[in-house]
Amino acid sequence: MATASKAGTTPLAGVLAAGAEAPALPRPAGWRRPALRVLSIGLFFAAWHVATTWDLDFYVRFQNIPGPEQVLEEAVALFSSSSFYVHILASLERIWLGFAIATALGVGLGLLIGWFPFAEDILFPPIELLRPIPAVAWVPLSIMLWPTERSSIVFITSLGAFFPIVLNTIHGVEGIDRQLVRAATSLGAGRAAIFREVVIPGALPSIVTGLSVGMGVSWLCLISAEMISGQFGVGYFTWVAYGIVKYSQIVVGMLVIGVLGMLSSAFIRLIGVRCMPWLARR
Amino acid sequence: MRPQGRRVTDSPTGRIEITDLGIAFGVDGRMVEAVQRFTLMTTPGEFVALLGPSGCGKTTVLNVVAGFVPPTAGSVVVDGEVVTRPGADRGMVFQQHSLFPWKTVLGNVEFGLKMRGVRKKERTSQAHAYLSLVGLTGFEHAYPGELSGGMQQRVGIARALVNRPHVLLMDEPFGALDAQTRLTMQELLLGVWREVRTTVLFVTHDIDEALFLADRVAVMTARPGQIRDLVTVKLARPRAAEVIATPEFMALKARVFAQVREESARALGPRP
């Protein structure tokens, strides 16, 4: 029982279990922690404001950096024009496509490689060979390989997400408790049933970890690829803003990337909780 | 609701014939004999305990009967069929952590029926019957991780029995439980076994447990494991926990204790 028994001994679960029996410790009131978090964001913007209005210069130079109020003004202007949405939609479409392809291939191949030694021998060596190459290094070759700019950027995005997904899936399959496989066979499960009922759910926690990591990497690859070779997209927008000396737009672009990345990670977490109710409930 | 189990009145099944069984493992490039010339026959519906010091190969014997491990010599025949691989006719209850963590209690118990292609509605009703037999009504939708060790083992027993196996194989099923829970589980198992009269092969290193539960106790030697003594336990059934204080029980325990002690000492090797 690779997942539950081990999860049961994670520090967090231990703390929760101990908390259930120990007398309740004095805890800060319900509003205090959220309030602290809001305050933390507030302090961040205040520091940014101070650094830019005073033009701080202590090796790091803030003279050319726009302050939060200029960035806000720029953001309002950008979000009221339709051309900015074209960039956002272009990036979202590439992320969605690239990540979906990476998930299908990564999980599929990972399950096969992890479970069948033959699949491991025939499929894994090239993956190991290509894995250390950063996806950005693929940009020139990708432009030659793929017919359109869109497809080559989707390829880069997908490639970045593929490796963490496939490796985590393999790792998850290999970590499956053999006793669960024995239990299933002694209950009458055949090979297909074991794969469906034991291997896939057993690897799921690791797969979701792979998806989380993969989502982060695919944003990294998308933005890099757009900066190098794009004609649309938030990465392209941010890079072009630097070229045309629109410094506030750089920061708006960065913040949009940050928010979109955060939302997509939250989306993966949500999927994880939905797919694995047995972990969510404890 | 009483499960349609294998009652005493059913045609007898669950005859285990273990003949001259030998099992060897390769460890560090050399073969180690775990079990040698092990022979044991059970009658259908009988409760047999395999008792011995740790490392004597009792679990290995069970794994061969389950079909997990191939024998190197001899054979295991269950109801006339030579065991070559795991099958639903031989239910297995493991020591711990063998429930599917991603399935609810109901999903775990239904698993064997699902493998046989039983329809969902029928599966659920049969699973409910076995869950009520082990006293877990109301926990159908809990996940194994939310249950105590004793409750998990009860799910494990229901999950194996729902297949109506000819033989129930139990590998130190209560070994990881605290003493109090273990006693409760032993009584529960005897209660369940009264209802579902399948042959039980029960591996343990606990003398009290073996004598309290079984019709016969096979005392094993240190590795390579063989049967040293077959003790028939003629204590009346149904047995209650108090039986362990009776003179008959004490006499049996004294006999078995001396043998297990000797074998444990042998397992540890000569003293310096």
Image (spheres, helix red, strand yellow):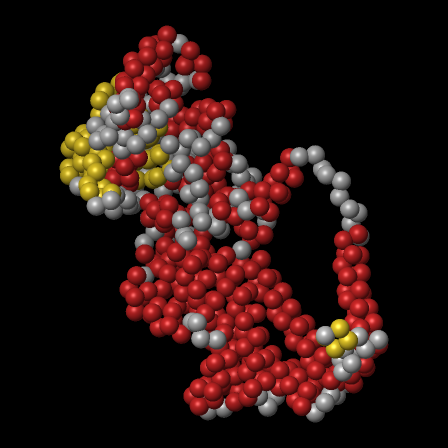
Image point (59%, 90%), residue name: A231
User: Quarter of the image holding residue B187?
Assistant: top left
Q: Is residue B22 above or below residue A160?
A: above
For the question of whether residue B124 can be seen, the reply is no
Q: Residue at x 25, y 39 (%)?
A: B64
Please give left or right for residue A248 compared with residue B81 in the image: right
Residue A181, x across and y down, in percent = 36, 49
B156 and A227: which one is in front? A227
Relative side of A83 to A184, left or right: right
In percent of the image, x 48 and y 38: which residue is there? Answer: B152
Q: Toward the viewer: A30 or B18?
A: A30
| Corner quadrant of residue A60 | bottom right
Q: In the rendering, at what x and y percent does residue A201 appear?
A: 45, 56
Relative vertical location of residue A24 with respect to residue B231 in this rendering, above or below = below
Q: Residue at x 66, y 84 (%)?
A: A238
- A249 relative to B243, above or below: below
Please state which of residues B177 and A131 is positioned toward the viewer in this rendering: A131
Residue B201 lies in quadrant: top left
Residue A126 screen position, x and y as percent: 35, 73
Q: Which residue occupies the extreme top position in the image?
A: B247
Rendering coords of residue A224 (x, y %): 57, 80
- Residue B239 visible in this rendered orientation of the protein: yes
Q: Quadrant of the C terminus of chain B?
A: top left
